[in-house]
Structure formats: C-alpha cells, structure tokens
Image (cartoon, rainbow, N blue to C red):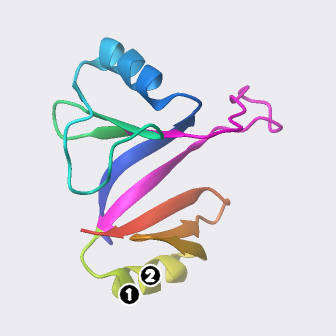
C-alpha cells in the first residue's frame, strides 16, 4: 500500500450547490474545517459518516459529463495521503503513473489510462 484515500474530488460549476445535493442524498457535514484544504467559493466539502470525504471543485468552463459520451468525460479525481512524497512517487511511477505537475502541496499524476490523481503529504 502506498497511501490512504484522502477524498474524492468532483469538478462542478457551483461547489456549494453540489455539496448540499450530496448532503441531502448521503447525510454528512458540509464544509467542516479541515487542515488539509481551504474552503471557499471554488471548493466545498462533505464529510460523511465513516470518514469518507467528497470534495467539490469549481471549474469555470465546466462541461457536464454525458456518460458514456467520450466528448464529455467524467470529471473526478482521487487525492491520496502519503507519508513520504518522494517514496510514494517512486512507487506510483513504477506502477505506470506519469507525473503531470505540482500545484502547491499536491503532486499530480495520470494513471495508466490517463485519469488524474494527486499525492498529498499526510
């Protein structure tokens, strides 16, 4: 095991609206303070019972998915907590990931099928 799932991030046009929708569907606490990220206009969270966290990321030019239409693909990614970024990077690269870039504390990779995921120091 390389890391622990931190959250599932879903792109959307209005994070607060989508957080309220999923809270109505699944319960949980919207925008609980959490040192792992900052809340704001472009970011909202939903902490579920059992520890799972859904995050909603605002995207200005959001194009909703039209599953299974590849012209409008699904828009979500995993954030993975790791204790040692350098060691975790070596392991995910060995598994077939490709490093895309760094954004703040997040190192962004693509899985072998091209889906993005982030490693974040726990």
Residue 63 lies within the magenta run: yes
Residue matched to label 1: 86
Decide which of 71, 46 is in the foreground and name it. Answer: 46
The quadrant of the image that shows the N terminus is bottom left
Q: Position of residue 90 (x, y in %)?
A: 45, 86
- Which structural element holds mark 2? helix
Could one spot residue 97 in this view of the protein?
no
Quadrant of residue 4 in the image? bottom left
Q: Is residue 117 above or below residue 51?
A: below
Count of numbered circles on the image: 2
Q: Residue at x 39, y 71 (%)?
A: 105
Q: Which residues are magenta?
A: 55-81
- Give the residue at the far front of this rendering: 41
Q: Position of residue 16 (x, y in %)?
A: 42, 26
Quadrant of residue 27 in the image? top left
Residue matched to label 2: 89
Q: Position of residue 75 (x, y in %)?
A: 61, 41
Q: Main secondary structure of the magenta part?
A: loop
How far is disc 1 from disc 2 in space, using C-alphas? 5 Å
Q: Which class describes the residues within 10 Å of circle 2: few (<14), some (14-19), or many (20+)?
A: some
Q: Is residue 72 above or below residue 88?
A: above
Residue 71 lies within the magenta run: yes
Horizontal arrangement in the rendering, residue 93 relative to residue 100 (left or right): left
Q: Residue at x 20, y 37 (%)?
A: 32
């Amino acid at each position: 095991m390389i890391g622990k799932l931190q959250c599932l991030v879903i792109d959307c046009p209005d994070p607060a609206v989508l957080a309220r929708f999923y809270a109505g569907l699944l319960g949980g606490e919207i925008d609980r303070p959490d040192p792992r990220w900052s809340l704001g206009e472009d970011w909202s969270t939903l902490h579920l019972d059992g520890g799972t966290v859904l995050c909603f990321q605002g995207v200005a030019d959001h194009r909703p998915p039209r599953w299974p239409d590849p012209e409008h693909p699904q828009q979500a990614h995993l954030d993975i907590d790791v204790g040692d970024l350098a060691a975790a990077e070596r392991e995910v690269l060995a598994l077939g990931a490709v490093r895309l870039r760094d954004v703040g504390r997040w190192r962004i990779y693509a899985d072998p099928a091209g889906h993005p995921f982030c490693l974040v120091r726990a």
